[in-house]
Image (cartoon, coloured by chain):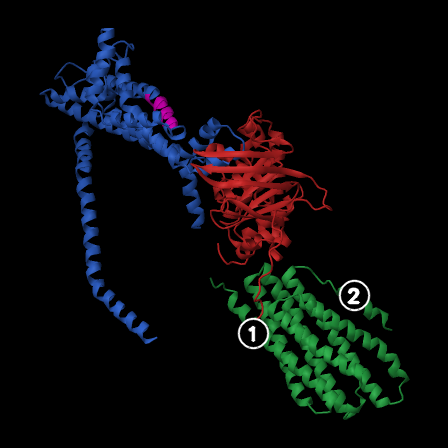
Amino acid sequence: MNSIQDRRQEYRSLFKQNVAKRLLVDKSVRIIVFSCVIIAIIPLGSILVEVFKNGLTAISIEFLTETPGSVGSGEGGIGPAIQGTLIIVGLSSMIGVPIGVMSGIFLSEYGDNALARFVRFFNDVFMEFPSILLGIFAFLIIVLVLGHFSVWAGAFALSLIMFPIVARTTEESLKMVPMTYREAGTALGLKKWVITFRIVISAAKSGMITGILLSVSRIGGETAPLIMTILGSSQFFSSMDTPMDALPLRIWRLSLLPYDSAQLQGWGAALVLIMIIIGINLGIKYYFMNKKNGFFGQLIKQRRNATK
Amino acid sequence: MTALTTKPTSMDASPEFSSTLDTSKYKMIAENVTVSYGGIDAVKNVTMKFKEKSVTALIGPSGCGKTTFLRCLNRMHDMTKNAKVTGKVMIDDIDLYSKEIDPIYHRRKVGMVFQKPNPFPTMSVYDNVTAGLRLNGVRDKKILDEIVEDSLKMAYLWDEVKNDLKKSAIELSGGQQQRLCIARALAIQPEVLLMDEPASALDPIATQKIEETIIELKNDYTIIIVTHNMQQAIRVSDYTGFMYLGDLIEFRETKKLFTDPKDELTAKYVQGHFG
Amino acid sequence: MTRLIDPSLHKLSFIMSEMGDMVIESISLAIDSYLTGTNTKDKVLKLSDSIRAKYFEVEDLTFDMLLKYQPVADDFRLIRSSTEISYAFSRFGRYAYDITLVRDLFGDVSECTNASLVESTKKVKHMIKAAVLSFAELDVRKAVEIHEDEKYIDRIYRERLPELIESTNTRCALAEALLLRYLERIGDHAVFMSDAINYIVTGKHRPSEERIASHTKTEN
């Protein structure tokens, strides 16, 4: 009996010696981690601050709705650019999201074969492609073939950027849905596509939405592909076969001009772009997270009930 | 002098299926079922017959093949890669594995409840119960309402949820969720109910409710339950099958198997000498 | 692998074996006191009380095991029969004491001894030994011997009683009647005990119940 007591004392004394040191290490790691986060956020935060600071004064109704005035005059606005960004983002999403989601579903639910492995690999490579290359590709196969810059080409290029991201995030979200729900569906005698679309997807909705929003945010700011496909313009949208303006293009053009007024408009346009992206993100997240049938909305409710 | 120095002699241990006095027929017969995963046999040539409106328990140590066997009875292994199933599983003289029949249609005659309660998380209580029907095209609200009430009553959950059927399924407690899963399985009007350790994830009170439910359901359904809990097997089942390493070692009336097992391996297992 | 229930089972086994030894001793002493006239009342009383105390111990242990371990199969049958058998042991102890009381009450009745009495008492001693051994070794073949002995004792009982009614020596007749009665009861319990042992080994219930019940009905 005594030997156990003695051993205990011995081991305990070891702990006591370590404690002070370990607390110190703990604290310093915390400080390091925290400071890294701060260091990472500071540039991002300061960008936001700069944009707000410099661009706020440019905002006005005319700024948001009028076409650009003559170069250097400081008049006019970025109306066409705003419209263009909304159109190109919407159009690209209409192409890229369904294809991406379908691929994601294929990879997750029907993806235990060689074809799927190839597709997945190809997808991952594609995600890393420099966007300018995709722009050039769209230029070659649409703009050169048709003979003019067009909105089609721009939507095509941006959807190429979009779809691998959507496919990947969809696949990952679906994979996170536990197998047991699919088994329950099978046991109820449901067909596989019914299980996938009516049960699994609704459970994976939140992750999929996040993935889609990610890709929307990404293409909202792409500039290089747009240069090669929609070119930019000073007019509002007229037809699908003509060039169109978009915010990244407008910002780029304005920032290259030597006039102060142009610079100011550039900052304003940047602010508008950021606000649009943030707005889309918050709006859709809020809508889906709080909707009663969302998976994570449910989990939040459950936790709230449990802690009552 | 010490007592119990000799072991009881092992008499005929072959599975007995019929008693001359019992004339009720067999609802489900599994014949020469073998399941192999990549060359290894998880279930070895097992034959079992299940009387209608009875409860049969399958017991055995982990890995003995009882869950694998259970999943053959509603063709769940169709979903598993590399699983090869041979043999017949007959419900009322129709072989579920025959090439001529539509497996999805016949699979609905057999309902299944899983070990961890798994109500569909994005659906309400009402939608969960009707999932097997709605998602197969049944739309008539009146019929659905009736079935929801019937199924929830049979699962002993109706009183607890009737005032708020639109409540989300995952807001229920574990025991209630499991009874919801039972109701969901019953809603598709099966004839046989398979249960894979239905109470193992639940607390003792919830377990008790599940067992009471099983005993009530016995009046209308044929139930096959896999369980690790021998006392549960004794409490709820009429017949018990003991499996070990893929073989069916003994299959008899529950009381007899647990008071006077014929096979020595069975006696060792039920008395806790291994497993 | 030692299971949780094993220490309790060993304890049960130990208590039962002690009871068995005490039963053999008390019956021998009792019978000898009758046949030879020695006074063994106090000794046998102590043994009988010990056996009774151990019977209660077995009861407690049995219910404790049922509560804690929910035994099945062999364990279950052993425990179930142990209640029956320990009760039989307690009866044996009690009847042994009753027999010594006869000698106490009637004084030395050794001269009342006759051949059939000697034979019966020999059979009882044999039967008790067979019963205790049968339980210790779970040997059901000894049941045959026990049943044979019991039949003999029964026969003597039924034959002698009418004879004793006609006897002129009241003292001897009464003493012998009492003794035969106790021997007959010991025989019945020995048979119940062998049934209980049979249940442990074969799982079959009460094969002798009918027979014993029927012959208690013919007495009136």
Residue B122 visible in the shown view: no
* Outermost residue to the front: C115
**Relative horizontal placement of residue C168, taking residue A104 as reference (left or right):** right
Q: Amino acid at mark 2?
A: Arg
**Which residue corresponds to the image point at 71% horizontal and 67% vertical from the top-left?**
C144
Which disc is residue C14 wearing? Answer: 1
* Outermost residue to the left: A258
Could you tell me how far apart the alpha carbons at marks 1 and 2 are, in whole angstroms?
32 Å
**Which residue corresponds to the image point at 84% horizontal and 75% vertical from the top-left?**
C158
Which residue corresponds to mark 2? C211
Q: Colour of chain B?
A: red
Which residues fall within the magenta stretch? A96-106
* Outermost residue to the top: A147
Q: Colour of chain A?
A: blue
Q: Is residue A155 magenta?
A: no
Q: Amino acid at mark 1?
A: Phe
Tell me where residue B178 appears, x and y as whole percent.
53, 44
Tell me where residue B227 appears, x and y as whole percent.
54, 49
